[in-house]
Amino acid sequence: MPYAKTPDGVDIAYQLRGDGAPLVLLAGQANNHRWWDGIRDDFHVTRSTLTIDYRGTGASGAPRTPYSTGQFARDVVAVLDELHIDRADVYGTSMGGRVAQCVAAHHPERVRSLVLGCTSPGGGHGIERGDDVRRSLAGTDPEATRRALLDLMYTPSWLAAHPGPYRTLGDPTMSAYARRQHLAASNGHDAWDALPGIKAPTLVLHGGDDLLNPTANAPLLTDRIPDARMVIIPRARHAYFEEFRDIAGPLVLDFLDREVHGA
C-alpha cells in the first residue's frame, strides 16, 4: 500500500488506478476508499481515479488530534504532491463533498474542475437533517441503526435487488476516537464565506429524495459558487452515485470531458 506523508507526520494511504487525467474521489464521513469500489471503474473510460483513506480510516494513520475538513483537504494535497500531480479533477460526496469544497477554495491551483455530490456548505447556512432522521440514527440498537442508514442511502426496491455487501455504511476498523473526530469534522465544516472564491468549474449533484443530507443544500451551493450548475436526480436518496450510477456517472464524465475540457 503506497503512502504519502503529511506535513504533520501522518501516513495517508492512497490508491491510484486506471489511465488518463486524474480524478480524485472523496468518500463520505467515517468511510475509506472502499466507498467507491462498486463504481470507480465507470470513470476509467477516460480517467484514472485517485482515492485516499482519510486519517483515522483504512490503512492511514490515526493520530489522536482534532480532525477537520480543512485538515482532510491538506491530506489530499499531500497525496497530490507525493504523486507529482499539479492539478486534478475532484469529486466529493457527502463529507467528501465538504472536503472537496476546502480543496477547491483553499488550494485553487490544484483543482481543474469540481463535482460536489449530496453535500452541504455546513455552518449556519446549511440545511440540517430532520429530528426524525437524527433519532433514527441515534438509537442503542446497532441493527436498527444500520437499517435506518440503509433506508436513507437507498430505495427499498434497490435494497431488495442488492442484498449487499454495502460499501457506504462506515469503516468497521475505525477506532471510537477516530469515529468521533470524523463526526466533529463534518459537523464543524463551514465553507460559506469561502465558496464564492471557488474558481473551478463546478457541478452540484444531489438525490431528489435525500433526507440524510437534505436536497435543499444543492441550490445553496449552486447559488454560492460562481457559475456552478446543478442536477437533481429524481427519486434518488443519499447514495445516488451508486444506485443511480447509470445516470450519475455519465453526468460527471460529460461535465468533465465536454463542458470543462472541450472533448
Image (spheres, helix red, strand yellow):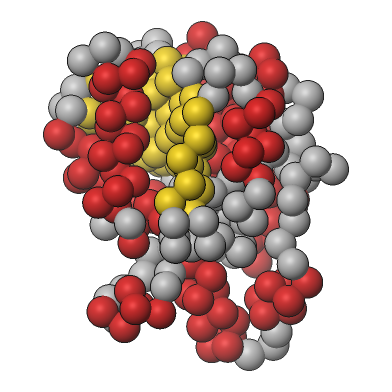
The location of residue 96, given as percent across then percent down, is 53, 43
Percent x, y for residue 34? 36, 55
Tally the numbered discs.
Answer: 0
The residue depicted at 53 percent of the width and 70 percent of the height is 152
**Could you tell whether 127 is left or right of 112 in the image?**
right
Residue 156 appears at what percent x and percent y?
40, 79
Q: Give whichever of 164, 245 is nearer the camera.
A: 245
Q: Is residue 12 left or right of residue 24?
A: right
**29 on left or right of 67:** left
Q: Nearer the viewer, residue 118 or 111?
A: 118
Identify the residue at horizontal 51%, vertical 83% (top origin): 147
Q: Is residue 254 above or below residue 82?
A: below
Q: Residue at x 18, y 28 (%)?
A: 46
Relative vertical location of residue 137 with respect to residue 252 in this rendering, above or below? below
Left or right placement of residue 67 versus residue 83 in this view: right
Q: Residue furthest right?
A: 124
Q: Can the viewer see residue 258 in this picture?
A: yes
On the image, the x and y values in percent for residue 230 come to: 50, 35
Residue 50, quarter of the rendered image: top left
What's the residue at 49%, 54% (across, down)?
207
Could one spot residue 82 in this view of the protein? no
Displayed quadrant of residue 75: top right
Quadrant location, the N terminus = top left
Give the quarter of the figure containing the C terminus: top left
Question: Splitting the image into 4 quarters, where does residue 16 fall?
Answer: top left
Residue 73 position (above or below residue 125): above
